[in-house]
Image (spheres, rainbow, N blue to C red):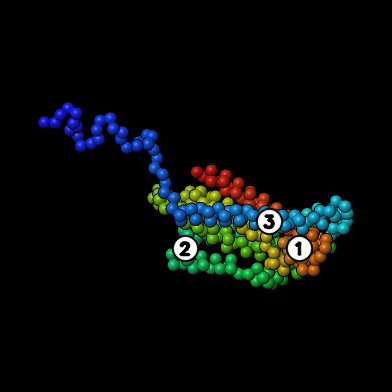
Amino acid sequence: MPTSTQTTATGPAAGAPGPALGPDVKGAKPKAVVRPGDRIFSAATLIAGILILAILAGVAVFLLAQSKDTIDAQITDPSAITGGNGFLAYVWPLVIGTLISSAIALVVATPFALGIALFTTHMAPRRLAPFLGYVIDLLAAIPSVVYGLWGIALAGNLTDFYVWLAKWFGWIPIFAPDASGAVSNTGRTLLTAALVLSIMILPIITSLTREIFLQTPKLQEEAALALGATRWEMIRMSVLPFGKSGIASATMLGLGRALGETMAVAMILSPGLLTASLIVSGNQTIASEIAQNFPEAAGLRLSELITIGLVLFVITLLVNMAARAIVAKTSVKGS
């Protein structure tokens, strides 16, 4: 028989210290295993983000440094700047021309882009939709020089149209003839440049909105159709509300492309002074001014061109910031 001092259990003797379990084992959260691949990917994305910011800062610093001569001339002798009236008088017409041409291009291109995107995603036959998508994407691969040559050819065919606009709508400042009562005899005006820009930004807006419309939940579309909605009513109630933020993003990206387009606009526009009319030669954009004058520029003139490049850089940055704010606001309203 076992004595009283012997234990009858196979476990440790009474009073012996047990294994250390740590504090509150039930409430402890298991540690996530960090694999080497995750660390490499995280470090690579961090480096990429820092690199983008460093490049952006480097561009800004370079433009500021190269603009020093123009800033000094504006302070000491404004008459030395092109035009003889200071930098603001020189750059203001260029800013207006840039904004007007980009705005017209956006207004013309956006409805067509949305219509094409909706047609290819919800209305076109299945065999035809991919082909149309490829054709639209192909427009983005055409070089700017080709668009510029096409714009020059288009300008020659628009002169009669501009005469008609001046005759019937000349009371509107943007369609008014010049002081002699004539319009551009070459058709190389800001309106022509804006129409070419609208074709250039069309594939960007179309491609992005098409991808957004394809992400619309099928259950929402089928539910709308099951309740008796027509196809247009289904698009209006399900597809368009779902893609509002995507549409805003696409249009802002298209605007950014229009603001920075250089070669095509430079080939179309003729140098001259700012005018309120879109059918009279003379308006310029910042990008076309740089492209036309940079090869022969030196000294203060070179600094002026770099300075207006800095102005374009700031405008593009503000447009992108506004786009982010619009997208964020649209996403919050849609959620």
Q: How many marks?
A: 3
Question: Residue 124: which disc?
Answer: 2
Q: Nearer the viewer, mark 1 or mark 3?
A: 3
User: Disc 1 to disc 2, how far (Cα)?
Assistant: 43 Å
> Height in image: 28 above or below 91?
above
Relative image position of residue 11 (x, y in whole percent): 23, 36
Relative image position of residue 210 (x, y in whole percent): 51, 58
Are the residues at dot 2 and dot 3 in contact (C-beta closer than 8 Å)?
A: no
> In this rendering, would 324 be left or right of 17?
right
Residue 101 or 314: which is nearer the viewer?
314
Residue 331 or 221: which is nearer the viewer?
331
Question: Callout 2: 10 Å neighbours few (<14), some, many (20+)?
Answer: some
Relative image position of residue 45 (x, y in whole percent): 54, 54
Residue 259 or 236: which is nearer the viewer?
259
State which tag comes first along the sequence, 1 or 3: 3
Give the amino acid type for the residue marked by disc 3 in the picture.
Answer: Gly
User: Disc 2 to disc 3, how far (Cα)?
Assistant: 47 Å
In what quadrant of the picture does the N terminus appear?
top left
Q: Which residue is mark 1?
A: 289
